[in-house]
Amino acid sequence: MTQQFKVLYFASAKDASKTDGDKFEWSDNINAEALTKLLLERHPDLAPILKISMFAINMEYMDQDHSWTVQPGDEVAIIPPVSGG
Amino acid sequence: MKDIVKITADIISLDEIAKAVADPKAGAISTFSGTTRDNFEDKEVKTLAYEAYIPMAEKSIQSLITAARQKWDDLIHVAIVHKIGDCPVGETSVVIAVSSGHRVQGLEAVHWLIDELKVQVPIWKKEVYTNGGPDGTDGGEMWKANNTLP
């Protein structure tokens, strides 16, 4: 069985992707750049939103320095600019 | 020392949350209550809706409370409750309540907690407008963004 990871979409990212979550096949070395590419292949309308969003993995914001990669079973979330309060 | 963290679709009561942090050792209960505005620039807001990445929002709020307890050692109980789903204009969207031995640290902590919540916690607000379109019927809607610095 192939290994996967999950992606969650919120707010404007959910509107653009028209889903609140989907699954991707995992492979080695999915860093921020590769993840962005995978997301845009499936959901081209996410392009403007990804430019202003953060990634969270397993409920932790990821550094902007891109020194991370997605692991099998991870829960990745697209976090557009927040507006709570 | 209680930490109360709740993301809820129910109507939020400032009174109940203030009571939940009451303590015989407290000399002060400091609170912040956020309510939804009826306007954005020249647009009239018809309804507002909040959405959250609930488990991460709860975890992130809990981390803020833990950090606040490290900054201010006089805090007794801390409660942060945020609404999700529809939030009609004028309704409470968020309440922060802190009991403390004396007032100064409680007031400072409440101010810091709401500023940090608005920057860090994965919660989003959508405004639906009544009068944005030229025909005055469909104003459209927009996901809002908070300023990145408190």
Image: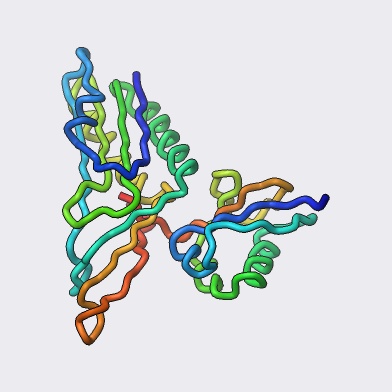
In the foreground, B13 or A40: B13
Q: Is residue A4 left or right of residue B122?
A: right
Against B7, is B15 above or below?
A: above
x and y percentages locating residue B18 in the rendered image: 20, 29
To which quarter of the image does residue A83 belong?
bottom left
Against B82, is B2 above or below?
A: above
> Residue lying farthest bottom?
B134
In the foreground, B97 or B127: B127
Residue at 30% x, 31% y is: B79
Against B68, is B47 above or below?
A: below
To which quarter of the image does residue B65 belong?
top left
Against B101, is A49 above or below?
A: below
x and y percentages locating residue B62 in the rendered image: 42, 34
Q: Is residue B103 left or right of residue A48?
A: left
In the foreground, A47 or B17: B17
x and y percentages locating residue B136 in the rendered image: 20, 81
Residue at 30% x, 49% y is: A85
x and y percentages locating residue B31 in the rendered image: 20, 35
